[in-house]
Amino acid sequence: MDFGISGKRALVLGASRGLGAAIAAGLAAEGVTVLAAARSIDAMAQGDRIGPLKVDLADVASVAALIETVKAEGGVDILVNNGGGPVPGSALGQSAQGWSTAFSSMAVALFTITDGLIGGMIEAGWGRVITIGSSGIAQPIPNLAISNGVRSAVSGWSKTLAGEVARHGVTVNMILPGRIDTDRVRSLDASRAERTGISVADVQSSSRTEIPAGRYGTPEEFAAVATFLASRQASYITGSAIRVDGGMIKGL
Ligand SMILES: NC(=O)c1ccc[n+]([C@@H]2O[C@H](COP(=O)([O-])OP(=O)(O)OC[C@H]3O[C@@H](n4cnc5c(N)ncnc54)[C@H](OP(=O)(O)O)[C@@H]3O)[C@@H](O)[C@H]2O)c1
């Protein structure tokens, strides 16, 4: 199927590994020119269509510089909002500073970048904003309080924005990963193993029993959904949050 996005331009945040890297590769395979942003860009996979861009989402000046650079290069048609996840921890006992730091890099940075770049999409009458969330928005994950809290705020923002720009041909959606096999999930499994005193293999096998598909997803399976949301064919999907979780979330 021709997704109709060859020749478009995309900015993918958090693109040095994991879900972001797979999305950058998926879009590039459809003929999209991708600006792939992260803090560490030296080892980033590159290709004819993927160019690295350095940004630290936790640094306000770096975020502002990224927006200016992308605008100076003519803006983008597709924006993939993604970045690092917070440290695990309970809801009880989090410091105000911990909440503010996470909200700044995981929410405000994405809001600011979107705000800075969406004007070009509105002007062009075509655009795609895709934000990576977590299954924790649909079903909060124990011991990931900051992720559950901050990403729920991002979800409220995404839905509000979708209603504001739909008439301009710009769609705004979220994708909610369940357990996709990346560095982040491996590190969360290791941290749970340490906390509970069981082996990482046992943590993984117990996780798999919670997933009807019986396995973790691959970054490529996840990225395929992002590519579809970016496509011409997905023009009437907006304000949605699509789960990619092998059936893990139990609620409707
Ligand atoms: N994998 C899953 O199943 C799953 C499930 C639920 C939620 N999520 C969330 O989805 C997002 C992506 O997941 P992932 O598994 O691909 O995570 P990952 O393997 O940890 O990759 C995170 C990406 O974000 C970049 N990043 C981290 N901090 C950054 C910062 N301050 N500024 C700019 N870039 C930054 C990293 O690159 P640098 O370190 O080079 O900057 C990397 O490219 C994360 O927020 C994660 O919590 C993932």
Image: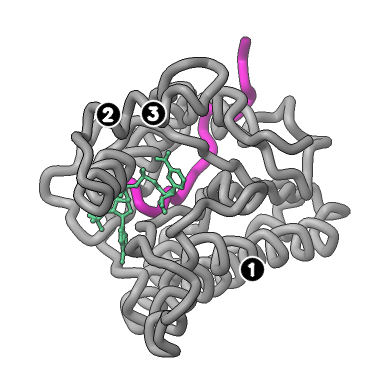
Evaluate if marks 2 and 1 touch, with contact meaning CB atoms under 8 Å apart: no
In the rendered image, the vertical position of residue 25 relative to residue 104, given as above or below: above
Mark 2: few/some/many CA within 10 Å (<14, 14-19, 20+): few
Can you identify the residue that label 2 sits on? 202
**In this figure, what is the number of numbered marks?**
3
Residue drawn 73% across and 47% down? 171
Where does label 1 land, which residue?
153
| Left or right: 68 as drawn, with respect to 48 | right
Q: Is the magenta stretch mostly helix, strand or loop?
A: loop
- The verdict on label 2 being within 8 Å of ligand 1 is no
- Tell me, for residue 206, which label it has, or none: 3
Label 3 CA crowd tier, 10 Å (few <14, some 14–19, many 20+): few
Q: Do the residues labelled 3 and 1 touch (CB within 8 Å)?
A: no
The residue shown at (44%, 70%) is: 67
Q: What residue type is labelled 2?
A: Asp
Image coords of residue 107 (percent x, y): 52, 70
Q: State which quadrant residue 60 falls in.
A: bottom left
How many other residues sit within 10 Å of disc 1, few (<14), some (14-19) or many (≥20)?
Answer: some
| Local secondary structure at mark 2 | helix
Which of the 4 image quarters holds residue 40? bottom left
In the rendered image, the residue lying farthest to the top is: 1
Q: What stretch is highlighted in magenta?
A: 1-17
Whether residue 8 appears in magenta in the rendering, the answer is yes
Instruction: Give the Cα distance between marks 2 and 3.
Output: 6 Å
> Between marks 3 and 1, how big is the CA–CA gap?
30 Å
Q: In this view, does 20 lie above or below 64?
A: above
The reply to whether dot 2 and dot 3 touch (C-beta < 8 Å) is yes
